Image (spheres, grey):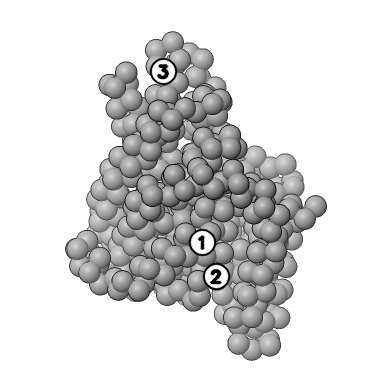
Amino acid sequence: MILALIAALLLGVLSGTLTGLFPGIHINLVAFFLLTVSASLLPFFPPIALVIFIVSLSITHIFIDFIPTIFLGAPDEDTALSILPGHELLLEGNGYEAIILSVLGALIGIFLLIPLIPIFIILLQIIYSYIKRIIPIILIIIIITMIFFEKSINKKLLTLLIIILSGFLGFASLNLNLKDPLLPLLTGLFGSSSLITSITKKQTLPIQQISKLKQIIQDLKPPSLIKSILASLIASPICSFLPSLGSNQASTIGSYVIGELDRKEFLILIGIVNTLVMSLSFITLFSINKSRTGSAVAINKLIPSLTSSDLLLITIAIILSAIIAFIISIIIAKYFSKIITRISYTKLSIAILILLTFITIIFSGIIGLIIFITSTSLGIFTILTGIRRTSLMGCLLIPTILLYLF
C-alpha cells in the first residue's frame, strides 16, 4: 500500500512536470484520461493511489506551468495574469527571478494551507450559502475599482470599453460549447498579444540574470510578502469552493482589495493563489462534497466520500509534491534562462505564435481560432492604448457575474 502511494506520488510529479512544460496539455485532460482507464487499474491499485496521482499531478503542474507562461508567453488558464509582470521582468533580464518569485509564492501557499484546513472545514458549511449570494456584488465592486484606478476620464472610458468587450467575448466563448473555450480566449488576450507586440518592436532578450535563491528571498521586503499573503487569504478561500471562480479571479479580487501591488508582489500573489485554490478545492470536496476543479471532479468519481484518513494522505501528498516541484522548477528555470538568449527572440516568438495557433485549432477547432484571433486583437488594442491589462479579466468576471445573477 505504502509503495503504491509513493509510486503514485512520484508518477504524478513526473506527469505534472510534462503537462506544465507543454502548452495546451491541461491537467484535466490527464485526470479524465485516468478516469477512463481506471476500471483496468483498480484491480491493481487502490482508489486512494489514483487520487494521490491526481493530487501530485495537479500541484506539480501549477509550479512548472509558470516556466512556459513567463519564458514563452504561453499561459494556462490559471497563470495568464503572471504573463504581465513576468514578461516585463524577462525583457529586463530577470525572467529567472520572475519564475522564482512565482514558485516561491506557490510554496508559501502550501504552507498557508496547513493552518487553513481546520478553519476551512469548520466554517465552510456555515458560510457557503451566504458567500454565494454576495459574489456578484463583490465582482461588480472589483470592476468599478478597476475603472476608478485610472486617472484620466479618457482612460476610465477605455477601461470600461475593454472590460465590456472582453466580458462579451468571454461570455460568447463560454457559451459556444467548445471543448476548451479558455484556451483560445486567455492565450489570445494575454499570450499571443504580447508575442505579436514583441515581434513588431523587434525586441531582443538581454542575458538573463541567475541570482541565488537565497539572495532573491533576502531582497524581498517583509511588507511585500505580507501584502501578497493578505491578498491571497482574502480571495483564495472564496474562489476555491464557488463554481466559475478560479485562480485568475482570485488574484484580481485580492490585488484590488488589498491595494496596488508591484510586479514582484503580484507574482508572489499569483503563486500563492494558484496552489491555495487548487488545494482548498480538495478540502471543499471533503467538507461539503462539492467538486470545484477538474481534479476534484476526478477524485470524486474515484472516491465519492472522502474519509479523514483520505484527507490526511491528500494533504501529505500536496506538501511533498509541492516541495519536489519547487526544486524541479528551479532547475528547469535555470536551464531555460541559460539557453533562451542563444535563440533569436523574434524567431522564437514567431515559432511560439504558430505553435499556439495549431494548439488552438487542435483543441478548440475553427471557432476557437476565431476567438483566438479576436482575443489577440483586443489584447493588442489594450497594450497600444496603455490600459492596465488586468482590465481584460472582464472576460471571466462579467460571465461569472451573469451566472450568479441569472
User: Horizontally, is 117 left or right of 181 in the view?
Assistant: left
The circle on residue 73 is: none
Indicate the secondary structure of the residue bearing disc 3.
Answer: loop
Residue 67 coordinates in the image, percent (x, y): 37, 54
Residue, x 35% and y 55% (percent of image)?
108
Give the residue at mark 2: 257
Disc 3 crowd rating (10 Å Cα; few below 14, some 14-19, many 20+) is some
Whichever of labels 2 and 1 marks the residue nearer the N terminus, that label is 1
Amino acid type shown at disc 1: Ile
For this rendering, which residue is in front, 226 or 387? 226
Q: Are marks 3 and 1 in contact (CB under 8 Å)?
A: no
Residue 144 in the image, given as x and y percentages of width and height: 67, 74
Depth check: 120 or 177 in front?
Answer: 120
Q: Are marks 2 and 1 in contact (CB under 8 Å)?
A: yes
Q: Residue at x 51, y 35 (%)?
A: 286
Question: Residue drawn at (43%, 45%), measured in percent from left and top?
Answer: 117
Residue type at the position of mark 2:
Val
Instruction: Using the image, tell me which numbered label, if any, was put on residue 234.
Output: 1
Instruction: Determine whether 177 is above or below 346 in the image.
Output: above
Helix, strand or loop at disc 2? helix
Q: Which residue is mark 3?
A: 46
Q: Position of residue 151 (x, y in %)?
A: 60, 87
The correct choice, above or below, for 122 with respect to 95 in the image is: above
Q: Nearer the viewer, residue 24 or 13?
A: 13
Mark 3 vs mark 1, CA separation in Å: 37 Å
Q: Residue at x 29, y 27 (%)?
A: 6
Please give left or right for residue 6 compared with residue 308 in the image.
left
Name the quadrant of the N terminus: top left
Q: CA distance from mark 2 to mark 1?
A: 8 Å
